[in-house]
Image (spheres, rainbow, N blue to C red):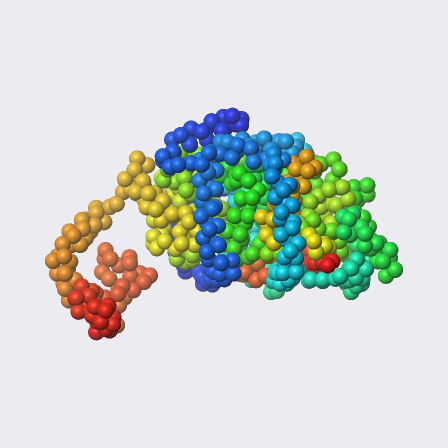
Amino acid sequence: MASKEAFLATVRAALAKGNDGAEVTPPDASPNPADDQDIAQKAEALRESLAQRRDALLEQLHRSALLQEWKVVFVSSDAEAREAIVDIANGLAANTVVRTSHPVVERLGLDEALETKSIHSVLLGSQSNDMQGIAAGADIGITGMDYLIAETASASLVAREGAARMTSLLPPVHIAVAQADQVVETIEDLLIFREAELAEESDSNWYMNLISGPSKTADIEQTIVIGVHGPGEVHLVVIR
Amino acid sequence: MPSIRTKEFTPRASEAINNPTIQKSLDRLANFRQGRTDSIEEFGQERWDEHTKRAKEIKQETLGHLDHYLDMLSTNVERAGGKVFFAHDTQEANEYVAGVARANSVKTVIKSKSMVSEEMGVADYLEGMDIEPVETDLGEYIIQLAKEAPYHIIAPALHKSKEEVSELFQRVLGTPAESDITALAGIARKVLREKFLQADMGMTGANFGVAEAGTIVMVTNEGNGRMSSSLPRVHVATMGMERVIPRLSDLATFLPLLTRSATGQRITSYVAFATGPKRRNEEDGPEEFHLVILDNGRSKMLADPQLREALYCIRCGACLNACPVYSKVGGHAYGWVYPGPIGAVVTPSILGIPIAKDLPFASTLCGACKEVCPLDIDIPRMLLKLRSDATEGPAGTRKPDRIESMMMRGWRMIVSSPRMFGLAGKVASILQWPLSRNKFMRRLPPPLSGWTKSRDFPTVSAKPFHARWSAMALPSEKGDKDGK
């Protein structure tokens, strides 16, 4: 049975033996996000810079989202977002929708709006005894997203209370909802914001998912098939 | 460990070359090559080169202090509530995984694609303990049903035609014949969805282990990585010890290098950051998280200044796609888990030169692998080093035979004297005439017949290069450059 110490001793011995005399940068002693004093200021400066470029970023997001095979809906109010989502669900003849309690979804009042079309909307949570069964049986999963990366059309998601992972994973259709002020340009930007958030919450848990289009494969004859294990149809609803 | 067939390089290469279905599949590598080229153009060559440069610096820094960063990674994984196991070899790694499975009374394990788990042969190991391992990446699932090794680092079932997949599904799953690829994928989705919902344990690889965050990052398109790490009660991730990176911000450097080199994608459909088990206030997620960090010969590469660079590899597969040898002989000829140019370096380094001595010779040293490598790894240099170890080193068992040595001595004599070289050219241009047709020789007599068995040899020109060179107009005169 290898212990960590024995393993690291082997690594150290290998390093000593294989040292070719090249200059090696000293190690980053403690790059723990919570220790970064400047991160809050860095995030604030970035927020301002992004706000100034918002229109251009939204355009870039729109272009890349289409390339990444999102179905893109830009709306200008919560009411329009609600209407767009009900239309999508109605168009798919959905019976059941599962959703998270992310603020951007919560405030849309989707449950009542969907109910008028006889579509049952459930906040997916661990209180239910068959959470997995409900998610797997649902026609659509609706989640609020934390950030949108314009360059790659990636929507980020962390797991938290009221935001089950399987909401965006098991149903065949996923509707991702976000606000225009959540758009960043690159993954670098997103990491800065996440770091700042974690530092503020004195948290260090980096669980996160980036979703950048439908589930797909090209494993047979390099022919692309959409919708393998995850959702095959993904909608991105952006509220300006 | 999975079966090792590295000593069968020549017969298995011939088999692939003579199989038209496989050659057709290998021709499709052109899609990967084109995808990569287009994607780098979109990204911007200059920006790409900066990323490569930065990535090399990060790798050099990380490997130079590997003990430090592995310690940091494991401390932070534990802080997030996960368990870390350091395994010297695949036996230890397999025993640990099996122990976790036993402790949780696991009957079914769902796996997402991981080269390290192939290296461990963990699927066979679990099967031997009456635990059902199910590969869930479509390509991996296909080769698991066919009981084969992966053909390509990122496209395991590259060599299978849709007809073969249909026959395989009919035979093993009892499904009807199907000629539509979407429908074939649908069959797999349906079967595997059931497995996902009933599995007690999920296994994944890790494209990156981020030391500062105690997070492992998985890059997938199908969503099976997210499912394997989210749905079952237990999540076990395996990674080679070289896959650690210091900081989250380093991902901004590595992610585009990986996905754009591999398939030409801006990003994959999913990039999942798994950090320990689920926390108390979360709705779902695994209750246990284990990270297995594997050495298995990597410390030997770390200890060799000439081979350490091979540990920079991020397993994108670009060198396979670019390699003129891989593109003909395919993945199975390499006989183990890692095929292609990087496999020809990694396999003898891990398994030992005597077992895999043919692999470093399976290259034309054209340099295409280095050219496309997003880490600019000097694979040709390492292949030469391994060749020299194989012939002259203490482990050298591939001694050149007497005829080969004699020919090399003769060649050295001829090329080291301009007069001899000129004379030899003249003699050859006379001797070759009964064999040449349209400036090519289609068949040479033994011992040179091996060369012409699969390709033609160009005839020696009547007017040699040095004669044409002297007759060439000077560049300033803008004359006919061919010197005709």
**Image quarter for residue A60?**
bottom right
Of residues B303 and A54, the one nearer the viewer is A54
Residue at the spot 46% in from the left edge and 38% down from the top edge: B61
Residue at figure coordinates x 48%, y 54% from the top left: B47
Choose top left, top right, bottom left or bottom right for residue B435: bottom left
Q: Position of residue B450 (x, y in %)?
A: 28, 57
- Nearest the eye: A55 or B304: A55
Name the residue nearer the viewer: A222 or A108. A108
Identify whether B186 is placed above or below B346.
below
The image position of residue A67, as x and y in percent, is: 61, 62
Whether residue B322 is visible here, answered yes or no, is: yes
Residue A89 seen in the figure: no
Q: Position of residue B27 (x, y in %)?
A: 46, 62
- Left or right of B327? Residue B82 is right
Q: Give the residue displayed 51% in from the left and 58% down from the top.
A: B43
Q: Is B480 situated above or below A120?
A: below
Quadrant of image for the C terminus of chain B: bottom left
Pinpoint residue B312: horizontal percent, then vertical percent: 45, 43
Q: How many marks?
A: 0
Lateral position of residue A178 relative to residue A116, left or right: left
Quarter of the image where one finds residue A57: bottom right
The front one of B294 and B97 is: B294
The residue lying at 34 percent from left, 52 percent from top is B365
Examine the rendered structure and indicate whether residue A23 appears above or below residue B381.
above
